[in-house]
Amino acid sequence: AQSVAQPEDQVNVAEGNPLTVKCTYSVSGNPYLFWYVQYPNRGLQFLLKYITGDNLVKGSYGFEAEFNKSQTSFHLKKPSALVSDSALYFCAVRGQGSARQLTFGSGTQLTVLP
Amino acid sequence: DAGVIQSPRHEVTEMGQEVTLRCKPISGHNSLFWYRQTMMRGLELLIYFNNNVPIDDSGMPEDRFSAKMPNASFSTLKIQPSEPRDSAVYFCASRTGSTNTEAFFGQGTRLTVV
């Protein structure tokens, strides 16, 4: 089985401050990990992914995520938050070699306060 | 490419009526996914196709739901008869056949069954 946990339904951060959106996962074997963002009344947009290699992955709009195998985590980060980053963020996982498709977390609503 | 195109964007129908949602995947993508998003259940995978063939429909909630992909550029999700609890946003997504590639989502169809 594979699963994703996003322990925080809501994250608030002041503009200009660093932000972190947490994600932990469970899969058999090695994972493929993804972050998506959803703006109101829009579909999900791909931000970044971890496949293999460097544990620090850089993606769109200045976001990055760090893969930590020992902690089975893939937290999303940004050094300086913008008001325009306010959106719903989804973490997703798939086990490498698995026949299963992506499993998404429940989402974290990020609000960046001006 | 225009991305994944879904129609209609909004659909309001009466209980008991048939509803058909449409999706045009990105050209060259050979995997297609239908998801449903609700506040209560989050993002659920309903069915996915590979090379126009349904691979896993275990997420389809009931026999009232059916999906087809008659060719590589078109898919439908049909609900017959519709019920108020089917009200949700339905997303279509597509990707290439490689399992480590990201999926691209359409903007969704917001279905309201009254």
Image (spheres, coloured by chain):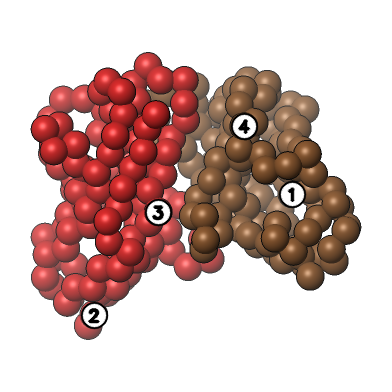
Distance from label 4 to label 1 (Cα)? 19 Å
Instruction: Report the number of numbered marks.
Output: 4
Q: Residue at x 74, y 64 (%)?
A: B84
Q: Residues within 10 Å of mark 3 (few under 14, many from 20)?
A: many
Residue A101's spot in the image, x, y percent? 47, 30
Q: Disc 2 marks which residue?
A: A113
Distance from label 1 to label 2 (Cα)? 37 Å
Distance from label 3 to label 4 (Cα)? 20 Å
The disc numbered 4 marks a residue on which chain?
B
Give the residue type at disc 4.
Ser
Q: Disc 1 marks which residue?
A: B21
Q: Secondary structure at mark 2?
A: strand
Residues at marks 1 and 3 on the same chain:
no
Q: Disc 4 marks which residue?
A: B58
The disc numbered 3 marks a residue on which chain?
A
Q: Secondary structure at mark 1?
A: strand
Q: Residues within 10 Å of mark 1 (few under 14, many from 20)?
A: many
In this view, the mark in front (4 or 2): 4
Give the residue type at disc 2.
Leu
Instruction: State the mark number for residue A106.
Output: 3
Shown in brown, the chain is B
Q: Earlier in the sequence, mark 2 or mark 3?
A: 3
The answer to the question of whether label 1 and label 2 lie on touching residues, with beta carbons closer than 8 A, is no
